[in-house]
Amino acid sequence: MIKQFKSACRTGFTLLELLVVVAIAAILIGLLLPAVQKVRTAAARMKISNQLRQFSIATANYATAHNDKFPAADGEGSRDNAAAFYQLLPYVEQGAEGWLHQPDGPPILRNPYDPTWQGFPPNSMGGNVSFSLNALLFRSGLTCNNLTDGASSTMAIAERYATCGKFYADWQMPKYSCYRYEDGKMILLQSCSSGRRRPTFADAFFNDVTPVTDLVTNTTSPSVASLTFQTRPLSIADCDSRIPQATFDAGILTAFADGSVRLLRPATSPNVYWGMVTPQGGEIVSD
């Protein structure tokens, strides 16, 4: 008679073993996630840096073709009184003007990590933009020769939320078509349905924070104490339209007039930051 023996081999996991495996997997995922997030953030910053660099280089190419003059944010001096971003588009990519009436506008004007970008309806003659121009640099009549602080020390373009507070930035807005001054204040005209503004920073017409230079000490401070830029506001309502916004906690990406792109940290001194905004302040700044 043949005896049958039970196999000593187990065919499955015990509950304790399963819990141990799950715990180890959770620990490994927890260790890997920060590294993956860092890679994703670095890739995002590289994309935005490339967009900024393209516009900075386009600005230099525009100036070369226009007697060393920078395009004016308000359209003054341009053939069709066109906004500065519109003037720069042909120097960024061939056929970029073809996006004029598209609801999303030229892709290069959009920061994909801007949580406030909304786009515009088709044929609306306008559109959001996630970047802003230094109003002190992009002004009528300013030339490369007037850049006495040096191109490498003058901020040209910075990140900015497309919609911020009561304003949305329109890349095709050249003049002051929605506003007028009354008793020293900017008044939104009834003909405008919402707070439309130029995509600029340090723009006094829109009550932005502006640099104030002490000619004795050659130092520059903000017109509102301590303000430089915002780092990831929690909502549109928390967004301060008077200054640019950074989409990452590490700092704000900015392009300079020489074509370089830098990351300015939240701890950047207001004197250093606003000294880099002025094209003719005479400051000696370092980031």
Image (cartoon, rainbow, N blue to C red):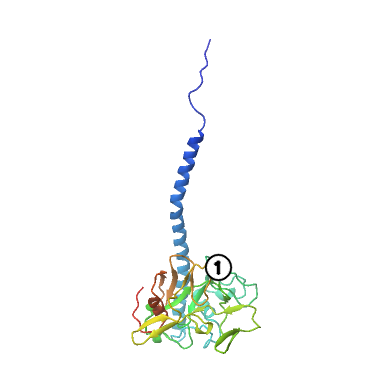
Residue visible at 45% across and 46% down? 27
Circle 1 SS class: loop
Q: Can you give x and y, in whole percent of width and height, for residue 241 in the image?
A: 53, 76
Is 77 situated above or below 30?
A: below
Residue 276 position in % (x across, y down): 40, 78
Q: Three-letter amino acid code at disc 1?
A: Ser
Q: Residue pushed farthest top?
A: 1
Say which of 207 and 115 sits in front.
Answer: 207
Q: Left of 169 or right of it: where is 263?
A: left
Quarter of the image containing the C terminus? bottom left
Q: Is residue 98 above or below residue 184?
A: above
Q: Nearer the viewer, residue 131 or 98?
A: 131
Determine whether, in the image, residue 286 is placed left or right of residue 200. Answer: left
Horizontal and vertical percent for residue 13?
A: 50, 33
Which residue lies at the image location 34% right of the left edge and 87% below the top edge? 216
Q: Is residue 235 visible?
A: yes
Mark 1, Cα crowd under 10 Å, few <14 / some 14-19 / many 20+, is: few
Q: Nearer the viewer, residue 76 or 153?
A: 153
Residue 80 in sight in this render: no
Answer above or below: position of 39 versus 62: above
Q: Which residue is mark 1?
A: 235
- How many numbered circles does the render carry? 1
Quarter of the rendering containing residue 257 = bottom left
Q: Position of residue 127 (x, y in %)?
A: 59, 74
Furthest residue toward bottom: 183
